[in-house]
């Protein structure tokens, strides 16, 4: 039986040449393929444009700050003796780098900071998980936590110095104490704010306490834990500088205080620039680690 499919107008399929029929079919297939490719590429282009726009805005803000730093001293709006132009500070930074002074101080500070920060991560995360998950432990330790978390680490520095001396153990313990609190508190918050529906659903599927903690509680608390870890990373540098300004013979804090007291102002700003770059790099590394351990998240 003949196919009586109709085409637009009075033209029927059997009135068309064979090559025109095939061409029309092929064109429809190719058009569909192109439309699918275009619809798939649009979200990618939008994401790329959004990332480019954010990067441009952030870069523009940083460049504007650097330009202000360079121009204000040169125009006399600020005293160039106390705030040298950025180019002068960068030249001093390069001289310290070439002379070997900057790497020496950076190595000393980095070793102390990473040691205290690493110990805080290893000790504070399990403690926070324990307090957040087990109510009896929380009831027992909460008063002590409230007492010490409201006590400034800087106020306890003389105590660490009296007990441990002015050597490396005192500085590392000081950094450990200061870094532990952001991690502990954010870990507790992450555990306690897990969606109750997730817990009920997991229990209804027969998960025991250990599996429930492993499969539901811990993954859901990862973002809050890494928020505390990033805060502790910044804290590890800030409090260490204070400790090095009081009792140290090497380190970025010692470099800043020594250059300020000897009125080598560009060298002082070189140390500050190094600290800022170090903090930024550490934060970027922690953000990358957070993304690595949060690949299950869809948003």
Image (cartoon, helix red, strand yellow):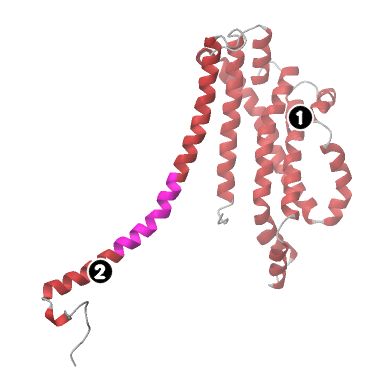
Q: Residue furthest front?
A: 9
Which label's residue is closer to the chain start, 1 or 2? 2
Q: In this view, does 123 lie to the left or right of 16?
A: right
User: Residue at horizontal 66%, vertical 35%?
Assistant: 233
Q: In this view, does 80 lie above or below 129?
A: above
Residue stretch in magenta? 33-49
Residue mark closest to the camera, 1 vs 2: 2
> Which numbered marker is on residue 174?
1
Any mark on residue 28, and which?
Answer: 2
Name the element at disc 2.
Answer: helix
Location of the N terminus by quadrant is: bottom left
Quadrant placement of the C terminus: bottom right
Q: In which quarter of the image is residue 27?
A: bottom left
- Secondary structure beneath dot 1 equals helix
> Can the viewer see residue 33 in this picture?
yes
Position of 52 relative to 165 (above/below): below
Q: How far apart are marks 1 and 2 (CA)?
A: 71 Å
Identified at 67% across, 29% down, the residue is: 237
> x%, y% of residue 269?
60, 16
The location of residue 43, given as percent across then percent down, is 43, 54
Magenta segment includes 42: yes
């Amino acid at each position: 039986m003949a196919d009586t499919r109709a085409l637009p107008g009075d033209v029927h399929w059997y009135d068309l040449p064979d090559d025109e029929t095939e061409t029309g079919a092929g064109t429809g297939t190719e058009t569909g393929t192109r439309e699918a490719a275009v619809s798939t590429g649009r979200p990618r282009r939008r994401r790329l444009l959004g990332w480019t726009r954010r990067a441009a805005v952030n870069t523009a803000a940083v460049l504007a700050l650097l330009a202000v730093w360079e121009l204000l001293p040169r125009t006399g709006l600020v005293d160039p003796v106390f705030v040298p132009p950025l180019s002068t500070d960068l030249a001093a930074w390069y001289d310290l780098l070439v002379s070997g002074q900057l790497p020496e101080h950076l190595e000393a500070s980095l070793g102390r900071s990473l040691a205290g920060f690493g110990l805080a991560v290893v000790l504070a995360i399990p403690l926070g998980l324990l307090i957040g998950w087990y109510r009896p432990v929380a009831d027992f330790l909460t008063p002590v936590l409230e007492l010490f978390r409201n006590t400034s680490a800087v106020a306890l520095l003389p105590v660490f110095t009296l007990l441990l001396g002015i050597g490396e153990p005192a500085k590392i313990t000081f950094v450990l104490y200061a870094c532990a609190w952001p991690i502990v508190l954010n870990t507790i918050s992450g555990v306690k704010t897990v969606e109750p529906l997730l817990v009920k659903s997991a229990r209804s599927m027969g998960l025991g306490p250990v599996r429930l903690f492993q499969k539901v509680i811990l993954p859901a608390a990862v973002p809050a834990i890494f928020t505390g870890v990033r805060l502790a990373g910044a804290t590890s540098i800030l409090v260490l500088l204070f400790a090095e300004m009081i009792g140290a013979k090497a380190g970025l804090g010692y470099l800043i205080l020594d250059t300020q007291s000897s009125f080598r102002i560009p060298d002082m700003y070189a140390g500050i620039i190094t600290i800022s770059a170090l903090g930024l790099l550490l934060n970027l590394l922690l953000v990358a680690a957070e993304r690595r351990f949060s690949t299950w998240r869809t948003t």
